[in-house]
Image (cartoon, coloured by chain):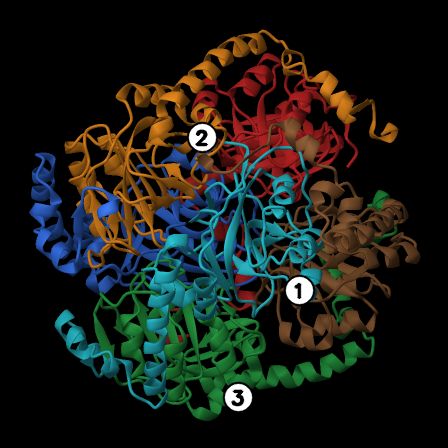
Chain colours: A cyan, B green, C brown, D blue, E red, F orange
Amino acid sequence: MKTVVVTRVERAEPSAIERLAGLGVSTTHEAMGRIGLMQPYMRPIYPGAAIAGSAITVLAQPGDNWMLHVAVEQCRPGDVLVVAVTAPSTDGYFGDLLATSLKARGVQGLIIDAGVRDVRTLTEMGFPVWSKAISAKGTVKATLGAVNVPVVCAGALVHAGDVIVADDDGVVVVPRADAARIAELGAKREANETEKRQRLASGELGLDMYAMREGLAKAGLRYVETLDEA
Amino acid sequence: MKTVVVTRVERAEPSAIERLAGLGVSTTHEAMGRIGLMQPYMRPIYPGAAIAGSAITVLAQPGDNWMLHVAVEQCRPGDVLVVAVTAPSTDGYFGDLLATSLKARGVQGLIIDAGVRDVRTLTEMGFPVWSKAISAKGTVKATLGAVNVPVVCAGALVHAGDVIVADDDGVVVVPRADAARIAELGAKREANETEKRQRLASGELGLDMYAMREGLAKAGLRYVETLDEA
Amino acid sequence: MKTVVVTRVERAEPSAIERLAGLGVSTTHEAMGRIGLMQPYMRPIYPGAAIAGSAITVLAQPGDNWMLHVAVEQCRPGDVLVVAVTAPSTDGYFGDLLATSLKARGVQGLIIDAGVRDVRTLTEMGFPVWSKAISAKGTVKATLGAVNVPVVCAGALVHAGDVIVADDDGVVVVPRADAARIAELGAKREANETEKRQRLASGELGLDMYAMREGLAKAGLRYVETLDEA
Amino acid sequence: MKTVVVTRVERAEPSAIERLAGLGVSTTHEAMGRIGLMQPYMRPIYPGAAIAGSAITVLAQPGDNWMLHVAVEQCRPGDVLVVAVTAPSTDGYFGDLLATSLKARGVQGLIIDAGVRDVRTLTEMGFPVWSKAISAKGTVKATLGAVNVPVVCAGALVHAGDVIVADDDGVVVVPRADAARIAELGAKREANETEKRQRLASGELGLDMYAMREGLAKAGLRYVETLDEA
Amino acid sequence: MKTVVVTRVERAEPSAIERLAGLGVSTTHEAMGRIGLMQPYMRPIYPGAAIAGSAITVLAQPGDNWMLHVAVEQCRPGDVLVVAVTAPSTDGYFGDLLATSLKARGVQGLIIDAGVRDVRTLTEMGFPVWSKAISAKGTVKATLGAVNVPVVCAGALVHAGDVIVADDDGVVVVPRADAARIAELGAKREANETEKRQRLASGELGLDMYAMREGLAKAGLRYVETLDEA
Amino acid sequence: MKTVVVTRVERAEPSAIERLAGLGVSTTHEAMGRIGLMQPYMRPIYPGAAIAGSAITVLAQPGDNWMLHVAVEQCRPGDVLVVAVTAPSTDGYFGDLLATSLKARGVQGLIIDAGVRDVRTLTEMGFPVWSKAISAKGTVKATLGAVNVPVVCAGALVHAGDVIVADDDGVVVVPRADAARIAELGAKREANETEKRQRLASGELGLDMYAMREGLAKAGLRYVETLDEA
């Protein structure tokens, strides 16, 4: 591993990030063509949080949060800190002191493929975290990792500057260069869904609205009154 | 697999279903003789929901929610949709559009041995879901499954028309033909528990109330002041 | 296994227990030198509960809660019931009746390396539980275990009379004899943290506050503008 | 639960069972239309075992193997013992004594959704077991379950007399009434595969042999030299 | 944590250790009254190994094997190294170099609640390891732990000098002071089992040999020809 | 997702690949600076296999192996097929027919972050597979994925043409451009280890060979005869 801090991070257009925040994770993920989603074990520490921001990435060693302290300095308002680890861990790499520091810099939240602690205080502060675990186990500051190198976090590749969208459905990564295009695609999907939602709410069946009946019949679906007829 | 939709579903008496709803999962499961419980990994997406209704069953293929759209048409007011999968999956088979459609038909909730998405919207809609996972990962509509065939969902056998009881303690399945009898047994248990609760609240020990002391002594339990005496 | 109930339990000073309650799990665990923490799969059934009390320990057999009834009698106001099992289990060993009984005796909460049920009622009662699972599966009363013997619960050794501290970050065990010393160490940590929190909130970097820059450079950390320079 | 032993078990034709044994799990599962497979956590205690036989089913209580002793008497030569549990367990319900007894009755192997022990001796005896876990933890004989009632074992529904096929790929359940038909379907698949195997071994591509190219193109697959063209 | 190495370790009588090795894990665990077993996720890296020896204990930090090097010096011929970790980890703390060193000192094997690597070489060397994982992920040497302090390893309490028995069924811990007594109890069980095995092999049913029929009937077990009668 | 097949794959020098094969996973991973390792749940279907080759990558949809058939045509002698999935799956995407086809093209093995079947036949063929699961569950051919795009497989980023090294310790990914350099670094490590191994085998302690005693003392390690002194 190159034990470096990359200091120049290009970020996506603020307007694209803002639109992705409005779309949320599931719509963004659809617009991405269903790639870029972190594993579903990544859960928010409290319900209702929804953020989007530019990734500042950290690659941390087992039970060692030294690099998180280094990464704070690289964060700008609106960023999201993304922590990957070199080996599976549930340790509590992050607590209320680091959150205080990040909040002072305008960071929106933390994504960590490991554990977090002080979750009650973080909840009271309104500092959202998506993590693999909650654990009081603290960490040491002994071994170097890296900041703003590409990392794999919970199964998703993240480059510094990629847009992170996170809400109750999970966490998705949008490559920086695609942010505007994905935001646009997602907006179209959503416009489309509003009308669908109204039709479904009024009792129209998806079978009819999506014109599925013919395809189902062609694929061989049969309707029977009882299993004995099947 | 027979790729069929069984259209005739016999349901339990509404009064029995209503009584089971009142009993909740733990009492119903006890009344069942401790069978019929789904695996404990099935968790509600928000706390406090408690439902009972007749099962409309779906057997779905990996990452494919085509059959859920088919199943909607088979649902009646008060039903509960139960989705089993042919192989372990955490994909988000179900979101707010399907929930809107089910709600329009009076369906009470969803039980799915896979993932669900749009959980914030579902929570706001008050549409409860018990699932194995939460995941933004959408699904395709390419391969047939079946509707209203017997399925194994999270370790429990479910026939269409069986009564599903779900609350914060999990999900239990009551065979249709047993619903009235189980509701009655459960009501007796509960009446019995109210008195016990009062006695325990007043300080009486379970050891005395359940007359356990003799049995414990006979089984060989010894009271010692310190481990050294043991 | 010695199938005994040890009746004499020495407890820590109430003042030490009270101070540990105030410190919470993460600070207490740090003060302990980062030992004594239960596995992170132990989660509270509702957020926000925070307790500390003397452990009454139970070693229970698979799917059998007989010993929990025995243990109730050994509890005093302020105690915490700690249940270990002889083999991995998710069964619901504990529900609202046992909680009513424990509450009548002034017990503060339950720590159980297995399942719990009636969680909605327990939440309404304000009786907190930290458990490995939630499950409606009831248990029998057929095989003896032990009460107040040393147990391993969720990976941590617990002697009767040890202080249990539990909150949203997990559960930590403080040996009885160390309680006062750990409470003092923890209080010092906390005093120290208040000042740190203020400095970080005002925008000072941890890198500077903890004087990390020299150590990082000595360990070989390099700052580069882009990865190509690395 | 009905605490009964059902003594009359209808079994499939021996010739059908024999043919299913020859097909193995994967081919049988395909012939079934991809249903009836137990969860993939069911693993053999040693590689290379491959059996098929009629199920004698047991529903056992947590940490209690009383019903296994009862079930032995119901077994005939060629049968396979299938043990389901009323709650998740890894306990060692079965060891070399029970295996000796089953072997004396001509039973071919054990399928258990829990743990097994004495695995070295079982391996030396050539008595195959497919289980969820290996554990030395013994069990008690205190609570009734049932024998030859329908059970859900590792996610699959099993009736007494169903045909169990088990090998290194897992365990599949064939309903008794379907055994002959599935054996025939499977034999056709296999005949078909022999020719395919030869063509593929000679270097023919599946793309051509299965005539996939047109379908892939129609679905939108594009061939590009580099990602930049994509 | 006290960062110490305890140098004086009392060991059990070699004859008791030898007898426990002969009994194996399952019989020893039974003789212990079914306590002291490590979690079933502890698996041998190759089948067939069976050892017993005195524990030299290590408490190691996340991703840090410094203390293992320290512990080597404390080992004597016949010992077993037992490594616990302060937080869940799958890292490869141990490989062929450490094994070479331990083998040179006559150590019989390793028990580690984390990962191990170089497993092919370890297998060729005939140096057995029971571990939670296999992982090539190496570790650092940066943070102190402890040697020969009491540890909880995979759910079992281990004091230095306790007897570790490990084979294909798992790992069990026998307190040093109990070793001779447990060896004797186990030998009696085994003598008893030899006769039972012969009777079962000759076709006698456990139902009769253990005289279970009366107890089963009293508990309410009923024999029926078909479920309809139940 | 771009549903494309990238046909031009640059591969590393054969000599570098060969040397990496000789080093094995653990040494290669160390030479990489401890990055690039797949998650430890990736296990070989039989022990003893050890390969290195150029990655042909597949991104497959849930329960759909269409793209594997497409990928076969892109493989050359010495390559390794690497299959990632868009959502967690244990399905058996790969069996003996695909293995026959790959073997005919000289492919060395398969790495798949999902399930595999026909494992007995694959073992007899000597076609090694590292997978997350073994499952007889077959897959459909209905939805496009991609071939030779960058994928995240079991937590590691893989580009087509990267060198995959796999053995009993797991699977590591070496970026194509780094292959020669890493092979050289690894060879130095290994030369170094041979001498160390001999010294350790002769009884020299790692404490002395690595000159650790001073560092340990400086870090505060204390040697005590008994815990009471600590």
Q: Amino acid at mark 3?
A: Arg
Residue D61 in percent (x, y) is at 52, 60
Query: Label 3 near label 2: C-beta < 8 Å?
Result: no
Label 2: element kind: loop
Question: Label 1 belongs to which residue?
Answer: A123
Query: Label 1 near label 3: C-beta < 8 Å?
Result: no
Residue B186, above or below A175: below
Crowd tier of the residue under label 1, counting other residues whose Cα lies within 10 Å: few below 14, some 14–19, many 20 or above: some
Q: Amino acid at mark 1?
A: Thr
Residue F86 in percent (x, y) is at 34, 54
- Same chain for labels 2 and 3? Say yes or no: no
Residue E64 in percent (x, y) is at 62, 31
Query: Label 1 near label 2: C-beta < 8 Å?
Result: no
- Same chain for labels 3 and 1? Say yes or no: no
Residue F198 in percent (x, y) is at 53, 8
Q: Is residue D175 left or right of residue B43?
A: left
- Residue A38 is drawn in which quadrant? bottom left
Label 1: element kind: helix
Q: Residue C38 bears which disc, if any?
A: none
> Label 3 is found on which chain of the structure?
B
Q: Residue B19 bears which disc, if any?
A: 3
Question: Label 2 belongs to which residue?
Answer: E47
Could you tell me which quadrant the N terminus of chain F lies in? bottom left
Q: CA distance from mark 3 to mark 1?
A: 39 Å
